[in-house]
Image: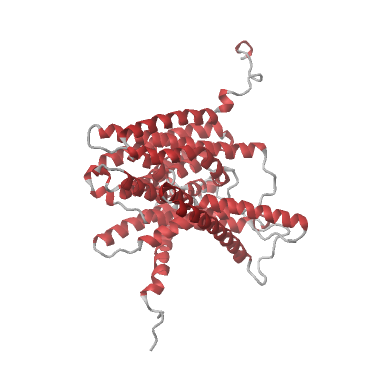
């Protein structure tokens, strides 16, 4: 009698079927985007449209007790899709040594990300502290705004759970759902805000017709697909297989690093196990990027010493792998949104006020920053940063891909390499996240500290305008 797995067992097909539904949703959304002119002109990415279509269908089926998806599968795709996509982008080769300007742009991107987190956190915290004087104690829950908008569903879930357990006010018993709903509203904000900006660009003639028409979007040549000295497209191991293998090898190295780091935190227990450990695993994309940069360095050394005769990485294929991972991550993360917080009427007002305020202030801030700090590619910088700071990093990549499909501007790469600076400058805020929910007094102290940090980061952000050299400026009498 056979007791092993049968091919017709549901468990054999569950993951494949759910993956097929996600892919079908994206394909159907892409067809709708081509058939419906207003939808096509909005330039909203197909993966975003597909995600909301699947979310609506899954919500209907779930209400009838027949959910289409297992939540853990969607969360797994969301979590790993972001990390694998960033690894693929970080592994790309670069023919030129990064200039001082490129390094400065990466630094400025990291500073901009942190300043936006601080602005979102300060605004959200002030909103919930203000509401606490009128409709119940909401305490520090507004700090979930940067976690849901800037960090996405993963961190919104982690910190929502931390706040739910750390606070003693009954209004925040559903902290996890509260955080996930903010993340959901972030995706809505990314789609609407990004669509509005793309529409404005199109109306002003800043979107080339070749970009609007997907059939003429790419002018691919042999040099774009493969470079001299690379391994052939097909030999004993297919070239695409090599690229995917390098991505997963790097990601496994990141896993090993996170795993051994967590062992020490488990021994310390307490704050470290409950707060620092989730942060480490939540920043899998950052650790993966670091591992990819280390692998690139080893490849460079091996090529110089003659140990490696050919180039194994291919930028074209790595871009396609990253694109697939980001598309899958976006559609899965939107489909995984939990709207149960809206079932509680007392959540409606704080959620709407926090989400609308977060979307508006982020749009205004990034619009100003992109024009001042990144004047050479301000449109691409806005879409990448706004998408990242309201959805996730992959949302930013998806939006910027609408006008820069081959990632020819530094906007997408800035999102990859800014992570280290964002962690360095954002670490004080992460400490404040754990302090704020302890009491109302600590929440107000946190708000004051966030304001001071925001002023400091803004000064660093606009340092060239505040502290730059003035010798090249003409006196007023010499101006025409």
Question: Given the current orientation, which residue lies at the most extreme front position?
Answer: 267
Q: How many marks?
A: 0
The residue at the point 43 percent across, 59 percent down is 76
Indicate the position of residue 6 as horizontal and vertical percent values: 40, 81
Let me know if residue 398 appears in the view: yes
State the quadrant of the N terminus: bottom left
* Residue 58, quarter of picture: bottom left
Residue 78 image-quadrant placement? bottom left
Residue nearest the observer in this picture, 61 or 107: 107
| Image x and y of residue 275, in percent | 42, 47
Query: 379 above or below 48?
Result: above
Residue furthest out toward the bottom:
1
* Residue 125 x, y percent position in the rendering: 35, 35
Provide residue 441's location: percent of width, then percent of height: 33, 32
Tell whether 220 sits left or right of 135. Answer: right
Q: Quick check: 326 left or right of 413?
A: left
* Pick the front one: 267 or 45: 267
Which residue is located at x 39 percent, y 64 percent?
A: 21
Residue 205 visible in rendering: no
Relative to 307, does residue 399 appear above or below in the rendering?
above
Which residue is most to the top?
477
Front-most of 439 and 379? 439
The image's colour scheme reads secondary structure
Quadrant of the drawing holding the C terminus: top right
Q: Tell me: 67 left or right of 380.
A: left
């Amino acid at each position: 009698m056979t007791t092993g797995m049968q091919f017709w067992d549901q468990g054999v097909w569950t993951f494949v079927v759910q993956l097929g539904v996600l892919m079908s949703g994206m394909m159907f959304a892409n067809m709708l985007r081509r058939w419906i002119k207003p939808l096509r002109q909005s330039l909203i990415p197909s993966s975003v449209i597909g995600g909301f279509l699947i979310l609506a269908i899954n919500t209907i089926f779930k209400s009838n007790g027949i959910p289409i998806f297992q939540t853990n599968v969607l969360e797994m795709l969301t979590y790993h899709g972001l990390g694998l996509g960033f690894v693929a982008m970080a592994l790309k080769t670069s023919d030129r040594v990064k200039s001082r300007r490129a390094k400065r742009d990466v630094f400025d991107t990291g500073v901009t990300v942190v300043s936006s987190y601080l602005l979102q956190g300060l605004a959200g915290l002030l909103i919930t502290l203000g509401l606490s004087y009128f409709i119940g104690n909401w305490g520090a829950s507004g700090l979930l705004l940067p976690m849901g908008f800037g960090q996405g569903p993963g961190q919104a879930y982690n910190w929502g759970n931390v706040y739910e357990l750390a606070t003693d006010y009954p209004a925040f018993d559903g902290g996890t759902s509260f955080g996930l709903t903010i993340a959901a509203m972030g995706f809505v904000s990314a789609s609407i805000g990004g669509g509005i900006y793309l529409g404005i660009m199109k109306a002003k003639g800043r979107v080339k017709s070749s970009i609007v028409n997907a059939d003429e979007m790419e002018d691919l040549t042999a040099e774009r697909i493969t470079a001299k000295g690379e391994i052939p497209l097909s030999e004993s191991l297919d070239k695409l297989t090599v690229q995917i293998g390098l991505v997963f090898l790097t990601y496994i190295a990141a896993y090993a690093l996170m795993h051994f780091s967590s062992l020490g935190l488990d021994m310390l227990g307490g704050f470290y196990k409950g707060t620092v450990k989730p942060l480490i695993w939540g920043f899998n994309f950052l650790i993966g990027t670091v591992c990819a940069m280390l692998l690139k360095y080893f490849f460079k050394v091996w090529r110089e010493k003659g140990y490696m005769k050919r180039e194994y990485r291919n930028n074209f294929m790595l871009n396609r792998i990253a694109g697939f991972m980001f598309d899958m991550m976006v559609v899965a993360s939107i489909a995984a949104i939990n709207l149960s917080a809206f079932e509680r009427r007392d959540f409606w007002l704080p959620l709407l006020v926090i989400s609308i305020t977060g979307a508006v202030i982020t749009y205004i801030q990034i619009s100003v920053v992109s024009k001042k700090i990144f004047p050479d590619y301000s449109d691409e910088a806005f879409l990448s940063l706004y998408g990242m700071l309201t959805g996730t990093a992959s949302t930013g990549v998806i939006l910027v891909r609408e006008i820069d499909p081959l990632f020819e501007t530094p906007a997408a790469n800035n999102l990859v390499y800014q992570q280290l600076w964002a962690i360095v400058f954002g670490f004080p805020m992460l400490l404040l996240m754990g302090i704020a929910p302890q009491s109302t007094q600590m929440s107000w102290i946190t708000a004051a500290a966030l304001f001071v940090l925001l002023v400091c980061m803004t000064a660093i952000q606009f340092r060239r305008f505040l502290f730059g050299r003035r010798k090249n400026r003409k006196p007023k009498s010499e101006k025409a």
